[in-house]
């Protein structure tokens, strides 16, 4: 699925993932077309502050994989500073005790993979694309999102990197 997010319709919400997804993996291609200088979210696997996903920090342009454990400890993995109108890819593999994430522009052939360990992951009851996990439409994604994928399995680092090029946007 590809989603062009514009002013009138700037997010999509789907259901289908319920209970605790542990382990899980997810990825997406995205590009930011307007910096709102606040949180931006590409993909959230839940609608609470403890849901994992791909999004920015408070500045709106430092993007990576956001992970919050059941103790409400927040971690950003694989962060990069976005340039407007440049395609980036983020992929993450999460399981209790081990996580790996990478975020890189399309021009980077061999990006660095960040790893961390975190306690129990949170439950998931909804998948949000282009909208904040906690602030809803007040923190929309302003840009394009392509090829969001979610797996109910922990992909290896090699599998994540293979997925990166299986669905790269053709209009970069």
Image (cartoon, helix red, strand yellow):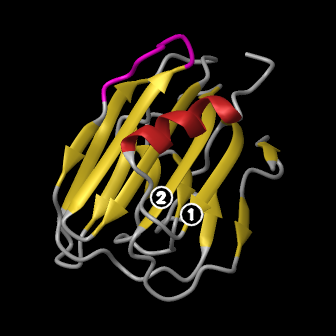
Examine the image and state in which quarter residue 74 appears. Answer: bottom left
- Residue 93 percent location from the top left of the image: 39, 54
Q: What residue is disc 1 on?
A: 151
Give the residue at x 36% y 35%: 59
Classified by dominant secondary structure, the portion drawn in magenta counts as loop
Residue position marked by numbered label 2 in the rendering: 25
Residue 144 visible in the displayed image:
yes
Q: Farthest residue in the bottom direction?
A: 19
* Residue closest to the eye, 76 or 41: 76
Label 1 sits on a secondary structure element that is strand
Please tell me the numbered disc located at residue 75: none
Query: Is disc 2 placed on a helix, strand or loop?
Result: strand
Q: Counting residues from the N terminus, which is met first, the one under dot 1 or under dot 2?
A: 2
Q: Quadrant of residue 98?
A: bottom left
Residue drawn where x is 49% and y is 89% of the image: 19
Query: Would you say residue 130 is visible in this rendering?
Result: no
Examine the rendered structure and indicate whether residue 133 appears above or below residue 143: below
| Position of residue 79 in the picture relative to residue 56 (left or right) | left
Labels in figure, total: 2
The verdict on residue 107 being magenta is: yes
From the viewer's perspective, tell me whether residue 118 is left or right of residue 123: left
Viewer-side residue, 139 vs 52: 52
Disc 1 and disc 2 in contact, CB within 8 angstroms = yes
- In depth, the one of 106 and 74 nearer the eye is 106
144 in the magenta segment: no
Residue at 63 percent across and 28 percent down: it is 165
Q: CA distance from mark 1 to mark 2?
A: 5 Å
Q: Residues within 10 Å of mark 2 (few under 14, many from 20)?
A: many
| Up-down relation of residue 45 to residue 34 (above or below) | below
Extent of the magenta region: 106-112
Q: Image point 16% across, 58% down: which residue? A: 117
């Amino acid at each position: 699925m590809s989603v062009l997010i514009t002013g009138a319709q700037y997010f999509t919400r789907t259901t289908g993932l319920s209970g605790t997804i542990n382990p899980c993996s997810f990825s997406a291609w995205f590009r930011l077309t307007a910096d709102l200088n606040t949180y931006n979210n590409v993909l959230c696997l839940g609608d609470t502050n403890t849901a994992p996903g791909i999004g920015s920090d408070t500045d709106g342009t430092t993007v990576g994989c956001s992970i919050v454990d059941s103790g409400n400890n927040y971690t950003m993995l694989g962060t990069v500073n976005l340039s407007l109108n440049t395609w980036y890819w983020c992929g993450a593999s999460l399981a209790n005790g081990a996580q790996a994430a990478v975020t890189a522009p399309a021009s980077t052939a061999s990006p660095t993979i960040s790893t961390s360990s975190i306690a129990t992951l949170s439950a998931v009851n909804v998948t949000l694309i282009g909208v904040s996990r906690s602030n809803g439409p007040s923190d929309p994604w302003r840009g394009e999102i392509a090829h969001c994928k979610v797996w109910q399995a922990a992909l290896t680092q090699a599998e994540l990197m293979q997925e990166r090029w299986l669905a790269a946007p053709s209009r970069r």
